[in-house]
Every structure is written in C-alpha cells, then in structure tokens.
Amino acid sequence: MTWNGEELDLDAYLARIGHTGATKTDLDTLRALHRAHVLAIPFENLEIMLGRPVPLELAALEDKMVRKRRGGYCYEQNLLFAAALERIGFDVTGLGARVRAGASTTRAVTHMLLKVEVDGEAWHCDVGFGGDGLLEPIPLHAGGEVQQGEWRFALQQEDDGVLALRTWSPDGWLDLYAYGQERRLPVDYVVMNHYTSTHPKSSFIRRPVVQRATPEVRRRLVGDQLTVTRADGSVEERAVPVGELADVLAREFGVELGADDSAALIRVHYAGA
C-alpha cells in the first residue's frame, strides 16, 4: 500500500478527529472525514521552531498528531489523511503544488495535496493548507465556485493542464496554489520536507506559524501576531504577550505544549522574554 494504511490505528485516528459516522468508500464519508480532520487538527510548524526534525513515517505522525494531539503542516497532515483513506479503501494519489498566495515569483513545488477517486470521479482533497485551506473536498476539474461555510473557492484552468485553487476575498480572487496531475510518492515528500524544514529561504524556519480554518473565521498566529479574518474582509489583529502564548495556542488553535516546550519556544523565538 502506498500510504501504509494497514499500519494505521484507524479507531484512534477517528476518535482524534471526532468522527463517529460511517467509514464507507463514498463521497459522504470522504466529505465528513475531510471536514472533521480540518476542524480538529491545526496547522503548525512548532517542531521546527523547537529545533527538532519533522519525520514523515506514519508511526511518528500518529504519535504526534493522534496520541499527543498536536498539529502539523501539509506533508504531516495529508500523509496521515492519505493513510486513513487508504485503510478505509479509497483510491488516493499524491500531488504537488506551487504555493502562490501573494508571491511575485514562481515558487518550487513544495506543497502536498491529494486526489481521491470516488465512483469514477476525482476529488481535490487537502487537509494541510492551514487557515485559507479547504474545509471539504472539491471536484478536481475547472468549473464553478464552491461555497464552504462563509468561504468561496474555485479551480481555474491554466496552460498545460495546470489547475489553480483560488479563494474569494473582498479584494477579489486570490490564487492559493497551482498544481498539475503528476503522481507524487512518499519519497518525493521527504525531499520537499527537507527543503521546507531546513532551507534558509524556507518561510517555516523563521518564526512560529500556527493556523486554523473554520467555517466562520480564519485564525493565524505568525510570530507573536494573532490575526482573525472573516469573509467580509474584517480583520482583528493583536500582539500576543509571551505570558499569554500557551493559553492562546490552546484556546485558539487546540495546540497544548508541555511546560518545557512552551519555555523553550519562548526562550528561542520571542525576543526579550
């Protein structure tokens, strides 16, 4: 099996995301699992901030995100999700994307997403993009807009079969990332992960990034800045004093660090603490 789904403790994973419904290989199940995962497991890069490697072996992913109830970034989250889907019986293919999100230059392929086949139709799944990401799967073809909670998404066809995932804001459509249909294997994500977690130009090694998507708001903590964005364009932003950091991580994002990790994060990344 490509994603080592046979090794997954499926019951523990389902409990972690709070899914109590059916686990059939149908669209309703896929939607329910995707939404539950996004709402339960936050996006975060705190292992990098704590000076640790980011292993992608399934046992490590389960230990971190299921048993320790932490979050992760795209490779961690989508690899765990792929293993769960494969264990249930879905046909899952890995894909790779170039993140745009306001970039003025072409970026490397460093983002992981999934293609899942259900009854002969392909679905774009991605539980690991963070605050701007999808809540549920969308059809994997260019076409109309999709409403998910307060948020609107669309896939736009570009040259050479490239599809761009976009989200709507009061300023217009924003491209999140663009991808082709070349199949990616777990070893490809190991290479991408090495760049993302170690390269000096990677945005994820510079400061803490924690995000969470919900149907109503998008929450982000970048460095010490907490931002809450709503679909009407209204934004609340404030600095988080170091004394409130642990509480904000737990309350706003569901990330509970131990005392030693909280102290280490503050010591290394919050100047003057």
Image (cartoon, rainbow, N blue to C red):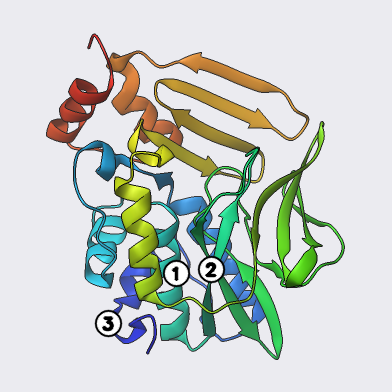
Callout 1 crowding tier (Cα within 10 Å): few <14, some 14–19, many ≥20: many
Q: Position of residue 77 (x, y in %)?
A: 42, 60
The residue identified by callout 3 is: 7
Q: Position of residue 30 (x, y in %)?
A: 59, 74
Q: Amino acid at mark 2?
A: Leu
Q: Amino acid at mark 1?
A: Phe
Based on the displayed image, in which of its 4 quarters is residue 147 positioned? Answer: bottom right
Mark 1 vs mark 2: give the one in front: 1
Extreme residue in the left direction: 260
Kindly tell me whether residue 141 is visible in this rendering. yes
Whether residue 98 sits left or right of residue 84 in the image: it is: right
* Distance of label 1 from label 2 (alpha carbons): 9 Å
The residue identified by callout 1 is: 81
Which callout, 3 or 1, points at the residue further toward the start of the chain?
3
Callout 2 secondary element: helix
Q: Position of residue 217 (x, y in %)?
A: 63, 36
